[in-house]
Image (cartoon, coloured by chain):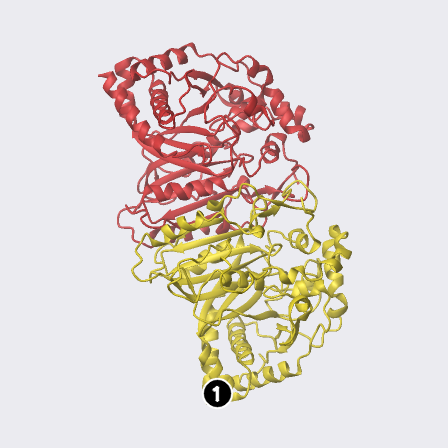
Chain colours: A yellow, B red
């Protein structure tokens, strides 16, 4: 039984019903032309026969219930793919709304620790004939960026390619590229992490220490908002795509970056949402924005140390969309990097979608007694540049669903997908009412920015 | 935090991925006349507003992960009904087959120990317009008979009654009857159980001791069959109704009891199934049949001690249906009671649907090295005598789904429901291939018995 590195077990130790530690993704596909009602079922049945399972997808917690702490991974010799890969359907009327409801439900429940920590759900019954796939992987196995990259690895840019593997499988090595290591980031710095591995029982304390110094040096003061409260276990998930071209046009016209425009969309939406909830603070909201510090020349092993984050003034106090965009642009240019040189643990905690500061969250009382270091994470993670397909099914959208923590009840993560930007919004159901309203407000914010850029 | 009696914690202690310890039930309803596509959703939304939750349905394990053993129940102050009461749909084509597949999946997964140990699923999308409700309750909360009785308590024999409570609620006391205590059986003998409560860590041993003396005295030798093997965690569930009148007619014509005829149906079906699987043993299969030892005059407190079980020679070695029925009739009349005077623990273990001898199962090596004490449990539990309704929806069927254990990979539990007998067949997916074939064989067996009775 291989011992589990602390960087894995940490995510199991801090997990609770209120703080599930899995990352998720919702993919939306067009059924291939000529496919009938039985197509999805047949595809599933074919894929389930593929028992060439990647190591990570066979890995389970060795003693899921009876031990204090989780010291080891075990190989699951009796993997039940029918359990992990499920076929479901939407209730009437089968709108995207029903799909998001179902996704919210799945994203709220804890993975079964008696089995390898992943689930994938195929969903039919969308009224427009499309189908969806919701995937859920424990953070102890894979972080969000790795999970997304891994999923992309199973897709193809060839609409006629019918050899796409199931998500637990590997593509036959045939394209000259070595298969990507889904955990390259986690593997970095394993040796230095061993230094703290012995401290596992004090997980929360260790994680807090990792951040303490920096949280005291935060360069901005975020106001307290309804998003910065202790959270419950239930989630709401909302998702929508917008054309990348619209964002690009605003960036060009205003001399800002695409990321600035995305942040301004979020800013406008958050402002409108908070006004609607009668909860807009006077001071501007502060977003934590993960950024890659990697220079184009860097490769390989050192990558893990190159992820950082900046704090961005979202300018939500300003009613004018153009002023908000300029505030954001300036704030991002000044780039107040919180963490100049990240330790491997910090890099891990900040990696990809799950940027929430574990070290801050599980400390009782912290959330209520101090001002939040930032109001929410807005994360833009790399997605496929081309139009992708999965066994002939055109990928319409790929929406990341994130981890929430106490004090961080809302997360916006987006990814580029061909010609679109796909937004996934994860919220605590108790703290963030009418989450789906944020989608409407994002749409309005984009229109306002277009108008302002004319 | 109230301490958990050993009789509760035992079911949590022996639970594993391969041995989920919940009982289930599938109910099939006709949508009321005039109800449209939105009816079920509206009903669910109305019911979720009913937060008058019975104590048992708020009860959760106090420390679900971090302790060795489960010493206490806690009250869930933040019960999330949206989590426990779910709305689902069947994939195309929405036959009963798809419903049974979904039920099998739900019956295979462990309940989340971070929450009160129950789930209820409303299912739409049956092609004939009906809907279903699958309920799942941990044995630590309720045994099968209690669960079934509890469900019945939420139904009404009045098609116009629209005030039926949700399964977690209580009917307003209005009918002159005191509300039934769903745990009456478990409450009996609590004082004597306290004697062994201190022995909790040695759960398996204690439970085995409870049965040891008797298993040595078993009056019949059961052959080894494909059903008497170690089991995996996945289940298959099959269900079907037959008219009670057909069974009654055979019983009357042959001078046997209805239960004899039911056992003969099972016997014929098992024989055909095992022939098909090339696995019919020479010696006849032996069923354990739970029976009520309660005299009509007994009431109240003493009830827990009045449940017993008899071993029945199923006569599966005989090709002639009439001879099988006579063998069963005779065997049941001789009624070799295994347990003359049950201790409260034994009564609990044998109670209702879940008659599987816990004490035998979790002992490593036992299953493979000895002959089974019996081949399967066939249990006939009391159901509603009248046609019942739930908020105007006519109850078409009520099918019990049982607990399986090592050495007992198949369970047949039936219940009467108005004019029908509703069979629920639970099997280990790995050990009992093509479980649904047993339904066909039951149908054939009934026809053969009718022919023989002419």
Q: Quarter of the image holding residue A161?
A: bottom left
Q: Label 1 lies in what chain?
A: A
Q: Taking B198 as reference, is A81 above or below it?
A: below
Q: Is residue B196 left or right of residue A236?
A: right
Q: In this view, does A159 lie to the left or right of A6?
A: left
Q: Which residue is drawn at 59% across and 83% down?
A: A329
Q: Quarter of the image holding residue A370?
A: bottom right
Counting from the top left corner in percent of width and height, residue B287 is at: 44, 20
Tally of numbered discs: 1
Counting from the top left corner in percent of width and height, residue B300 is at: 51, 23
Q: Taking A82 as reference, is B339 above or below it?
A: above
Q: Taking A360 as reference, is B443 above or below it?
A: above
Residue B164 visible, this orientation: no
Quadrant where the C terminus of chain B is found in the figure? top left
Counting from the top left corner in percent of width and height, residue B340 is at: 53, 13
Q: Which residue is drawn at 44% across and 64% down?
A: A156
């Amino acid at each position: 039984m291989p011992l589990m590195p602390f960087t894995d077990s940490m995510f199991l130790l801090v997990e609770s019903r209120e703080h599930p530690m899995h990352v998720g993704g919702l993919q939306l596909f067009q059924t291939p032309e000529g496919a009938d009602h039985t197509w999805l079922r047949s595809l599933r049945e074919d894929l389930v026969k593929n028992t060439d399972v990647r190591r990570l997808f066979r890995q389970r917690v060795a003693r899921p219930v009876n031990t204090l702490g989780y010291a080891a991974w075990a190989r699951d010799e009796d993997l039940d793919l029918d359990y992990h890969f499920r076929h479901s359907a939407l209730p009437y009327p089968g709108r995207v709304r029903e799909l998001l409801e179902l996704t919210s439900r799945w994203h709220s429940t804890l993975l079964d620790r008696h089995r390898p920590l992943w689930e994938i759900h195929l969903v039919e019954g969308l009224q427009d004939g499309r189908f969806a796939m919701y995937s859920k992987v424990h953070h102890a196995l894979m972080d969000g960026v790795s999970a997304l990259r891994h999923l992309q690895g199973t897709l193809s840019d060839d609409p006629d390619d019918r050899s796409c593997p199931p998500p637990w499988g590997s593509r036959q090595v045939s394209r000259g590229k070595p298969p990507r290591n889904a955990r390259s980031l986690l593997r970095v710095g394993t040796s230095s992490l061993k230094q703290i591995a012995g401290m596992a029982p004090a997980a929360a304390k260790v994680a807090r220490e990792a951040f303490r110094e920096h949280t005291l040096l935060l360069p901005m003061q975020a106001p307290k908002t309804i998003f910065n409260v202790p959270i419950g276990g239930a989630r709401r998930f909302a998702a929508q795509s917008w054309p990348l071209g619209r964002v690009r046009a605003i960036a060009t016209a205003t001399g800002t970056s695409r990321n600035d425009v995305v942040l301004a969309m979020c800013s406008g939406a958050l402002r409108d949402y908070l006004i609607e909830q009668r909860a807009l603070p006077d001071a501007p909201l502060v977003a934590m924005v993960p950024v890659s510090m990697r220079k184009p020349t860097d490769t390989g092993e050192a990558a893990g140390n190159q992820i950082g984050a900046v704090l961005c003034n979202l300018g939500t106090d300003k009613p004018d969309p153009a002023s908000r965009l300029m505030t954001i642009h300036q704030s991002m240019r000044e780039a107040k990097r919180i963490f100049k040189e990240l330790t491997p643990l910090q890099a891990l905690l900040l990696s990809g979608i799950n940027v929430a500061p574990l070290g801050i969250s599980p400390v009782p009382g912290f959330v209520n007694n101090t001002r939040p270091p930032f109001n929410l994470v807005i994360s833009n993670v790399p997605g496929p540049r081309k139009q992708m397909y999965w066994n002939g099914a055109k990928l319409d959208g790929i929406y990341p669903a994130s981890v929430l923590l106490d004090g961080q009840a809302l997360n916006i993560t987006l990814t580029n997908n061909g010609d679109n930007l796909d937004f996934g919004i994860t919220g605590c159901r108790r703290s963030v009412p009418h989450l789906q309203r944020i989608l409407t407000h994002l749409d309005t914010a984009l229109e306002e920015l277009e108008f302002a850029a004319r």
